[in-house]
Image: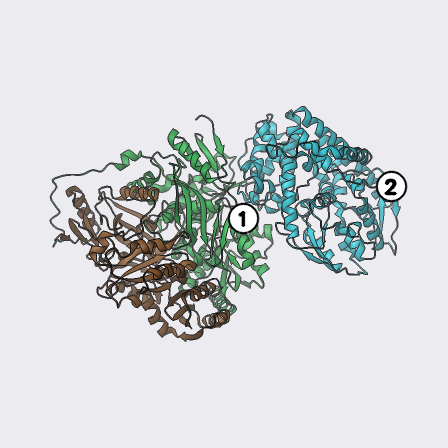
């Protein structure tokens, strides 16, 4: 095909027919949910069909007794919560783009959010899916029950970035809203003090519902958008959420506040009501795009590091920022060590664009060097594809590509994503056997 | 986002402004979630982000858009829900107006389409002609059922389908013109606290003359002198939204001239507008005339005085309230909540007037009226209206209030629950007559 | 009798697999062999014993992560974590006594390979949810890794999920990183007495649907137990709230304190209720929680002597049936019905396990896919051939 083309199917048989046609004719397909990926996961490529799931936007079944909801993949993440909140339930993973991102996309990316410290990522809250394979076959994985009868294909589909199959239905676990939830704003005079406080809270055996950090610049932008009353003088701001029965929340709020004061917190502010708690989060959740107020473009990274290395990583990042002559703003999930540095640049200036990419790659290499990974929740997509070799050996990647071959032997689904260099499945499938070799005599045998 | 305008292109001030707007967008896609047409159609090109890319492509490429590109821009309601959602501060309103202007200048629409748009652009700003058209339309209305009720393609309605929509929008009874809509001064009842001009409007005085009447009664009772200034009239929004910028600018200049005369004469504390669609436009006159040095400052001066009627009522405060024990579902018009960012204030006033006020689920979604939209995009308009009505009915109100006459007519056409303008309810609660719709 | 090969490190392990590949010898992969009586009986050319690759590599309590070698006994890991007041939140069960073997055996990696989990599966997830990363050898004799040591990681496919629950059929692991959590200050249990199955499951679902963070919900004959964990004042408040919530069920109520609770839930975890009658076959059924009682009723109508109890709020049914040649597999799987679920034969004599599907048979398209997945890791089918049949 020479011309880009898109399909907006409305039924599963249509999806199946499209994929079967594509398989038969060796046409590439890029599946797409709401198009909010931060790694270019659903970016169209020139010679592929774009398969939009936007019309799959209905909630199919809500089963409160079994605490599950069955929805179409185009339903937004927040849409699920909206559908059940009048009964006091919600869907726990809450990526910051939850207003717009689709649940199908969440499955593809294994999206996290600000509350996954306590409640897990998509993979921990997903009960089942229906998916269409490249052959057009429709299979169901999981359902309202727990765990798989065979290989955990549901687990491997989650976060597979649209490379293995097209999800056409999703069953998620619902949770009952906690009796109370309160968010605490903690302002620190240095980023290091804030990062220290994060480690100290976890070390004290407290697992908050969420523990987020923003640097001064991010606070300024978010505050300009929502007016949450963030302390503008703090170099590092933590938002810590605690939930449970009121006695527990009060108890933990006091303990967290005490730990924070011990680390020099200059602001300790507890949300007084639900409205204020939501406001505290609104700023955090809009922080990325809000940075659009002060820069024409930004590159959002997603490295994940051991919590204990946060301080060191932040400091080194500041150094890199000077080297590359580009500003960096930090908004991130401190509780689970998942960084989101935003590199500010002007894409209309080719040199800045180039420097931003270099800077980004340097940050991710740093993350891997300290024992972390390239991406905590945004996915590899196109953005980090060429850095996969920093974290994985060729054998590691070959093994992953072989798994891809089991689902999509012609590499038709979401081409150009995740893997830096493609190898044909036939080549990957070859097994080298050296006959007549002596068994290794030094290994103990009985 | 990255843009690729040449220096020559950026020399055009409208393009330069659009470049600035585009540079703010970080294509996060939050706007898609609250866009009524994306919610209905699930097609990226029917979302703000999709339209931003379409408009960018046509103005960057300096080319005529394709029919398909035009179709998706045409489906935009201009409800500006996206602007409320956008964390990056993208001024979609100005960008889409530029896009429409560009389409109007470079794209050649089909003959029936041009005819229909020409008729609407002629009639909408002219109350007298509009009234005659309504009277004639009244005669033709019984024949509406002979026209097609659906189109094979939602949003791509045929001429006849649009004609049917236009006839269906004609009210069963065309009210007689109200005496308040002639140029005159209404003195404050007590000691004068403020002096304001009341924007007479265009469509509203034909279809809902009771709104201006209630406004005059309410404001004068609150000791505000109200002037209906000779020469002021349509704000220009209806023609602006079909891409006729020049015509909109002429209308704006006429208003600015008239109000400036009054400001320089007896003085004005505010220009009061009781149709929120018009309010959004008048408040934006500064931008509309930004490229005309002779008018820019004047336009800004007028725009700064523009106030929704609820803003002025809140400034002086309600007094002598006789509460009515009714539950009101408040429909926040798009131009009110997204265009003017007035969402809380009208509800607060209604509560102060003694009503029980309920929010409507999916309150951010447009009711589908959107000016000429209900005629040009009848299918989408109807689906949005039905969705709005079922959301409103879910809170079981006694009455529905809104601050924009268009929404009122549109929603009322789909429900048995009575509707009134916010001002009518406030007028009633402070000693005015019971709104006709409630009798 | 097959010989045993017992590598001492990852390198030897790789060479052992390479050797098996070259020889065309199949491998019976084991840690301590504590679950050898579970799954399809195998006939392998060689036993690959991982117990020589043992020991904790790194334990970072403040990072909530422990990294250990494949042969490390679970008891050693639990003892280490206890020193820092942490735990394996998914409660890996000790199925030894149920399977007629010794108690206290087994490796943590073995529990991972079976994706086993105890009562806290409801709130904390299964083994799969705690395996952060691993390194191992695939069926090509290549050393590879996946995942990492951090809490959040979506770099590449989540092979940890696939390996957890693969019963050693995809790759042989030499090292894993596992997420750990703090031990709650207090554990208490609310017992509801005398409820029938259906009422009990309704009560458990109501408790799980409440905001009181129940971390265990089991119904044994005559006793329904709900576990509440956390800081003392919170536990107290939630227990009180639960009592009020469940007052309508009309059951007598009792409470267990922290020590009593620990014993009680350990027994639930290890399926102690069914271990005594060694002449029965034991099934576990995973199903939507509300479906549990109906499934049991269908089976009971055919086999009145069935013993059953419900964990996971009804979503995990344990059954003991009188022994017979086919372990009643058609009856059990037929009882599951259209609402979804699957049954695994946990305990049965070898001959019975050889004759009937131990794991739930899958629809053709899915089975074919699973087979291709197996091939992508182990093309010559060296590892535990046929175990998951």
The residue tagged 1 is A99
Chain A colour in the picture: green
Q: Does residue B163 appear to the left or right of A33 in the view shown? A: right
- Note whether residue A214 is visible: yes
- Note whether residue A321 is visible: no
- Residue at position x 35%, y 53% from top? C334
Question: Which disc number belongs to residue B321?
Answer: none
Seen from the viewer's position, the closer of residues C162 and C347 is: C347
Q: Does residue A183 appear to the left or right of B270 in the view shown? A: left
The secondary element bearing badge 2 is classed as loop
- Residue at position x 64%, y 49% from top? B390
Instruction: Tell me which chain the residue with mark 1 is part of.
Output: A
The residue tagged 2 is B183
Seen from the viewer's position, the closer of residues B42 and C20 is: B42
Residue neighbourhood size for the residue with mark 2, other residues' Cα within 10 Å, grouped as few (<14), some (14–19), many (≥20): some
Chain B colour in the picture: cyan
> At which x and y percent is residue B128?
82, 35
Please say if B129 is above or below B403: above
Q: Which chain is brown?
A: C
């Amino acid at each position: 095909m020479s011309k880009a083309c898109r399909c907006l199917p409305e039924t599963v048989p249509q999806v199946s027919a499209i994929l079967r046609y594509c398989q038969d004719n060796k046409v590439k397909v890029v599946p797409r949910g709401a198009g909010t990926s931060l790694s270019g996961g659903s970016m169209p490529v020139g010679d592929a069909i774009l398969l939009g799931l936007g019309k799959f936007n209905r909630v199919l079944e809500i089963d409160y007794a079994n605490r599950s909801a069955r929805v179409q993949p185009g339903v937004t993440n927040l849409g699920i919560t909206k559908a059940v909140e009048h009964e006091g339930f919600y869907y726990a993973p809450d990526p910051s783009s939850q207003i717009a991102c689709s649940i199908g996309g969440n499955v593809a990316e294994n999206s996290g959010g600000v509350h996954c410290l306590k409640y897990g990522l998509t993979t921990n809250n997903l009960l089942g899916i229906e998916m269409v394979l490249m052959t057009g076959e429709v299979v169901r994985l999981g359902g309202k029950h727990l765990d798989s009868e065979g290989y955990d294909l549901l687990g491997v589909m989650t976060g597979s970035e649209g490379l293995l199959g097209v999800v056409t239905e999703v069953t998620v676990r619902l949770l009952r809203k906690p009796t109370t939830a309160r968010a605490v704003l903690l302002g620190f005079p240095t980023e290091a003090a804030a990062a220290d406080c994060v480690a100290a809270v976890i070390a004290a055996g407290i697992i908050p519902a969420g523990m987020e950090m923003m640097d001064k610049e991010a606070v300024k932008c978010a505050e300009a958008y929502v007016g949450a009353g963030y302390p503008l003088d703090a170099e590092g701001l933590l938002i810590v959420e605690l939930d449970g029965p009121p006695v527990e929340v009060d108890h933990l709020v006091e303990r967290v506040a005490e730990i924070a004061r011990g680390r020099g917190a200059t602001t300790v502010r507890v949300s007084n009501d639900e409205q204020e708690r939501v406001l505290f989060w609104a700023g955090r959740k809009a922080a990325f795009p809000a940075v659009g107020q002060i820069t024409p473009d930004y590159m959002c990274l997603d490295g994940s590091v051991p919590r204990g290395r946060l301080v060191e990583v932040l400091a080194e990042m500041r150094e890199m920022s000077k080297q590359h002559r580009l500003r960096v703003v930090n908004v991130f999930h401190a509780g689970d060590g998942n960084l989101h540095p935003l590199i500010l640049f002007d894409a209309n200036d080719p040199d800045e664009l180039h420097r931003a990419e270099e800077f980004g790659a340097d940050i991710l290499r740093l993350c891997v060097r300290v024992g972390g990974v390239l991406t905590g929740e945004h996915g590899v997509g196109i953005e980090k594809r060429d850095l996969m070799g920093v974290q994985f050996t060729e054998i590691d990647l070959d093994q992953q590509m072989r798994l891809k071959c089991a689902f999509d032997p012609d590499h038709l689904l979401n081409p150009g994503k995740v893997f830096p260099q493609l190898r044909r499945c036939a080549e990957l499938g070859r097994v080298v056997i050296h006959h007549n070799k002596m068994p290794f005599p030094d290994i103990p045998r009985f | 986002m990255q843009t690729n305008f040449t220096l020559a292109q950026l020399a055009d001030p409208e393009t330069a402004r659009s470049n600035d707007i585009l540079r703010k967008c970080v294509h996060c896609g939050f706007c898609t979630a609250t866009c009524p047409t994306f919610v209905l159609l699930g097609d990226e090109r029917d979302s703000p982000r999709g339209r931003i890319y379409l408009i960018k492509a046509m103005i960057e490429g300096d080319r005529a858009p394709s029919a398909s590109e035009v179709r998706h821009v045409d489906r935009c309601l201009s409800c500006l829900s996206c602007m409320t959602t956008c964390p990056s501060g993208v001024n979609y309103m100005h960008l889409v107006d530029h896009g429409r202007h560009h389409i109007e200048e470079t794209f050649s629409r089909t003959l029936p389409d041009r005819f229909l748009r020409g008729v609407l652009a002629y009639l909408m700003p002219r109350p007298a002609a509009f009234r005659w058209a309504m009277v004639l339309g009244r005669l033709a209305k019984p024949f509406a059922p002979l026209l097609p009720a659906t189109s094979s393609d939602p949003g791509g309605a045929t001429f006849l389908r649009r004609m049917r929509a236009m006839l269906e929008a004609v009210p069963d009874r065309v009210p007689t013109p109200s005496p308040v809509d002639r140029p005159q001064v209404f003195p404050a009842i007590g000691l004068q606290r403020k002096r304001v001009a009341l924007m007479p409007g265009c469509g509203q005085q034909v279809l809902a003359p009771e709104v201006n009447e209630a406004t005059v009664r309410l404001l004068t009772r609150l000791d505000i002198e109200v002037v209906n200034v000779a020469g002021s009239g349509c704000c220009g929004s209806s023609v602006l939204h079909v891409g006729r910028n020049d015509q909109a600018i002429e209308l704006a200049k006429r208003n600015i001239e008239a109000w400036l005369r009054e400001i320089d004469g007896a003085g004005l504390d505010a220009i009061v507008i009781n149709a929120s669609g018009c309010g959004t436009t008048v408040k934006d006159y500064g931008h509309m005339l930004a490229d005309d040095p002779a008018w820019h400052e004047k336009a800004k001066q007028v725009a700064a005085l523009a106030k929704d009627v609820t803003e002025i009522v809140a400034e002086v405060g309600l007094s002598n309230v006789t509460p009515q024990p009714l539950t009101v579902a408040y429909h926040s018009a798009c131009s009110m909540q997204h265009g003017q960012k007035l969402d809380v204030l009208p509800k607060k006033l209604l509560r102060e007037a003694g009503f029980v006020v309920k929010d409507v689920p999916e309150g951010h979604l447009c009711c589908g009226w959107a000016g000429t939209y209900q005629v040009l995009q009848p299918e989408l308009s109807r689906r949005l209206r039905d969705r709005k009505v079922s959301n409103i009915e879910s809170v079981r109100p006694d009455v529905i209030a809104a601050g924009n006459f268009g929404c009122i007519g549109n929603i009322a056409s789909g429900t048995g629950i009575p509707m009134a303008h916010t001002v009518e309810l406030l007028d009633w609660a402070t000693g005015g007559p019971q709104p006709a719709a409630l009798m | 009798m097959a010989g045993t090969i017992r590598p001492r490190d990852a390198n030897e392990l790789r060479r052992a697999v390479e050797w098996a590949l070259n020889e065309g010898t199949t491998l019976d992969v084991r840690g301590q062999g504590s679950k050898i009586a579970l799954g399809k009986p195998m006939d392998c050319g060689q036993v690959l014993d991982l117990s020589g690759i043992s020991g904790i590599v790194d334990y970072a309590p403040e990072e909530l992560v422990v990294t250990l070698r494949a042969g490390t006994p679970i008891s050693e890991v639990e003892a280490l974590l206890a020193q820092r007041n942490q735990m394996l939140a998914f409660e890996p069960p000790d199925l030894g006594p149920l399977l007629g073997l010794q108690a206290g055996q087994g490796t943590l990696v073995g529990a991972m390979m079976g994706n086993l989990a105890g009562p806290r599966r409801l709130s904390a997830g299964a083994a799969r949810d705690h395996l952060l990363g691993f390194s191992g050898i695939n069926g090509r004799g290549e050393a590879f890794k996946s995942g990492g040591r951090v809490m959040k990681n979506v770099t590449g496919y989540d092979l940890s999920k696939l390996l957890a629950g693969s019963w050693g059929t995809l790759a042989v692991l030499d090292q894993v990183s596992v997420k750990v959590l703090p031990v709650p200050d207090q554990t208490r249990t609310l017992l509801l007495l005398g409820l029938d199955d259906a009422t009990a499951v309704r009560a458990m679902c109501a408790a799980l649907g409440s905001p009181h963070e129940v971390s265990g919900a089991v119904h044994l004959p005559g006793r329904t137990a709900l576990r509440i964990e956390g800081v003392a004042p919170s536990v107290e408040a939630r227990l009180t709230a639960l009592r009020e919530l469940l007052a309508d069920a009309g059951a007598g109520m009792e409470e267990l304190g922290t020590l009593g609770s620990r014993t009680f839930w350990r027994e639930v975890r290890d399926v102690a209720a069914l271990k005594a009658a060694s002449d029965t076959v034991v099934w576990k059924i995973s199903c939507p929680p509300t479906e549990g009682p109906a499934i049991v009723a269908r089976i009971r109508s055919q086999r009145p002597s069935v013993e059953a109890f419900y964990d996971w709020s009804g979503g995990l049914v344990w059954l003991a049936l009188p022994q017979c040649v086919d372990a009643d597999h058609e009856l059990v799987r037929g009882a599951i019905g259209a609402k979804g679920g699957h049954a695994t034969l946990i305990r049965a004599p070898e001959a019975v396990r050889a004759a009937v599907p131990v794991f739930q048979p899958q629809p053709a398209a899915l089975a074919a896919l699973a087979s291709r997945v197996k091939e992508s890791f182990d093309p010559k089918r060296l590892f535990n051939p046929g175990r998951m049949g």
